[in-house]
Amino acid sequence: MAQILAPSVQWQTRFTKHSTEASSMTSKMWGSLFLKQNKKTRVKSSTKYRALAVKSEDGTINRMEDLLNLDVTPYTDKIIAEYIWIGGTGIDVRSKSRTISKPVEHPSELPKWNYDGSSTGQAPGDDSEVILYPQAIFKDPFRGGNNILVICDTYTPQGEPIPTNKRHKAAQIFSDAKVVGEVPWFGIEQEYTLMQQDVNWPLGWPVGGYPGPQGPYYCAAGADKSFGRDISDAHYKACLYAGINISGTNGEVMPGQWEFQVGPSVGIEAGDHIWCARYLLERITEQAGVVLTLDPKPIDGDWNGAGAHTNYSTKSMREEGGFEVIKKAILNLSLRHKEHISAYGEGNERRLTGKHETASIDSFSWGVANRGCSIRVGRDTEKEGKGYLEDRRPASNMDPYIVTGLLAETTLLWEPTLEAEALAAQKLSLNV
């Protein structure tokens, strides 16, 4: 728990044992406090009171720390379940807590619940009740013990999925016998940008100014090149604790921008894991006093945008002769390019410009090892004749249920006409 709690950048001053003079604390310095919460020190907020779990000079233990870290397991069988759902914008995560009488192992053991949909933009005020259906369980890294995080989807009291419930349709696609038989794997590369809380400007950037040009920041180390590493590392550990299938992290091309990867995940699990990972990231940045944005182009100009590249394969693609199956899938994707683009994230047109490792939003392309294409195929896949494809079009704010569901539907369930297929194959130089 202590590794995840972090002081806010709002904490501007600190007092040492031998001085009462305040010293300035920049946003880069909060990381040292983040890792040293047991150090004896007094901390004073320059703006408003926030609970910071530390010990004072005279050894008095901060009571808030005691309560936050309290393990109630020896005293009760009851647990806390944090019900998490997607709000009315389609990208915001909401949650509330509920006491459950005993530990559970499966979502079916949890009761349905409800919330005020008129306060989340999902229901009118005169009929505001929206029902939460528990769908996936993760361990809670904030509360520890047997406490859990519960990913839910949303329904009317009559049992109909509400319009923002994208999980329902994806679950139908992934339960189709043909899709189940192909065991679709997904690996999603979630990029995100960290922003300074009060100025809406990337972390590490001079307020009202710009850092040096891109180049030194990707996968970099150093106080002048890497901004927000503690957040990325805390999130990594929280995901592992929760049971999220996180496979890695790295600093991105634009300073203040990071990425984590989830997968390989099968079917609907990919969306559940990404949404839970996003929730954890929101909570960690909340504690750090840093703002998380999934905007696909947070800074205009000669800066990389933020995407959610989605790696995808089926059983047939992974077996001998799979490269021909991949090319057929690419052909299908080319014929439904507009449908995919319309569902791949709001504001994506600001990112998909044909620059900064993207293809143009208006055209479809594919290539081997080409990061400027809509669909990239790796060198190893070409060499081995089997493997996976990477859809580079999804924006960072995409809904993973929509993207994974569309990929499975377009490549496994949808069949183009022979004429359209022939024309597309000729245009794309695909021999299928």
Image (cartoon, rainbow, N blue to C red):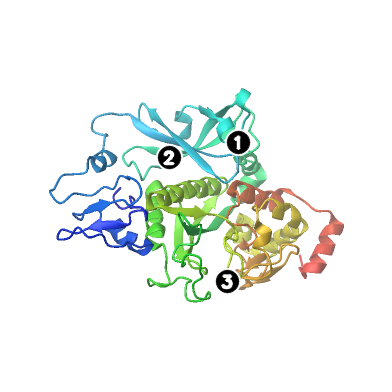
User: Residue at label 1?
Assistant: 121
Residue lying at 57% horizontally and 54% vertically, measured from the top left: 185
In the rendering, at what x and y percent does residue 59 appear? 13, 48
Against 158, is 13 above or below?
below
Label 3 crowding class (10 Å Cα cut-off): few <14, some 14-19, many 20+? few
Amino acid type indicated by mark 2:
Leu
When asked about the image quadrant of residue 106, the answer is top left
Q: Tag on residue 380?
A: 3
Residue at the limit of the structure toward the right, as seen here: 419
Mark 2 vs mark 1, CA separation in Å: 23 Å
Question: Which mark lies nearer to you, 2 or 3?
Answer: 2
Residue lying at 48% horizontally and 68% vertically, measured from the top left: 255
In the rendering, at what x and y percent does residue 152 appear? 52, 36
Q: Which residue occupies the foreground of this view, 161 or 361?
A: 361
Left or right for 215, reference 426: left
User: Residue at label 2?
Assistant: 149
Q: Identify the image quadrant of the C terminus.
A: bottom right
